[in-house]
Amino acid sequence: MADTNKTDNLPAGTNEAVTSLFAIENLIKTHISHIDTVKLEMSKQVEMFNDVLNNDEGYKKAAEEGKEVNKKKAEAKQNVLKSPSNASLNQKIKDMRQEIKELKNALSNYLQQYQKIADTDQIESEDGEVRQIVYNAHLVKLSGKFGK
């Protein structure tokens, strides 16, 4: 019986691609673990620093004064917002921020589609400026309902 290797039926370069995939996956897992470790250590350092601040009389006094100023500022802002025209203006700003957020999300989706179809990471805008498509990938934990 001849020795048949299962990888003979795979496309050329598969082994390298699989090896690269596993290497990248291991790098991702290592980085996630390292980030978690650094976050935990940073949390401890922040807690120690906050303890130092809270035990300093000068800082405590300044923090209390700051709270009082912030409280006065919030009250003054609420007084300004009592005017219907000011409240309307504030709401318009909030709505516009939300619209920009939604437009950016849609643009991101369109850019992904464009990049796949056009096979390029550049696009020329209406003003003639060439822009590069860049992504900022990040991980979020899945909750139990979306889990494996």
Image: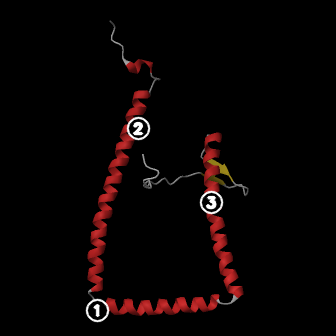
The quarter of the rendered structure image containing the N terminus is top left
Q: Residue type at mark 3?
A: Lys
Q: Does the residue at mark 3 contact the one at mark 2 (Cβ under 8 Å)?
A: no
From the viewer's perspective, tell me whether residue 40 is left or right of residue 97: left
Q: Which residue is mark 1?
A: 57
- Where in the figure is residue 125, as x and y percent of width and height? 70, 54
Question: Which residue corresponds to the image point at 37% horizontal and 38% vertical from the top-left?
Answer: 22
Q: Earlier in the sequence, mark 1 or mark 2?
A: 2
Q: Residue furthest right?
A: 126
Q: Which residue is mark 3?
A: 104
* Gap between marks 1 and 3 measured at Cα: 46 Å
Q: Earlier in the sequence, mark 1 or mark 3?
A: 1
SS assignment at label 2: helix
- Where in the figure is residue 134, as x and y percent of width and height? 55, 52
Q: What is the crowding at mark 3: few (fewer than 14 residues within 10 Å), some, or many (at least 20)?
A: few
Q: What is the crowding at mark 2: few (fewer than 14 residues within 10 Å), some, or many (at least 20)?
A: few
Residue 44, located in which quarter of the rendered image? bottom left
Question: Which residue corresponds to the image point at 38% horizontal and 19% vertical from the top-left?
Answer: 6
The color scheme shown is: secondary structure
Observer-nearest of 75 and 107: 75
SS assignment at label 3: helix
Q: Residue type at mark 2?
A: Leu
For residue 21, the mark is 2
SS assignment at label 1: helix
For residue 141, the mark is none
Question: Which residue corresponds to the image point at 61% horizontal and 64% vertical from the top-left?
Answer: 101
From the viewer's perspective, tell me whether residue 139 is left or right of residue 119: left
* Gap between marks 3 and 2 measured at Cα: 31 Å
State whether residue 63 is above or below residue 126: below
Q: Earlier in the sequence, mark 3 or mark 2?
A: 2
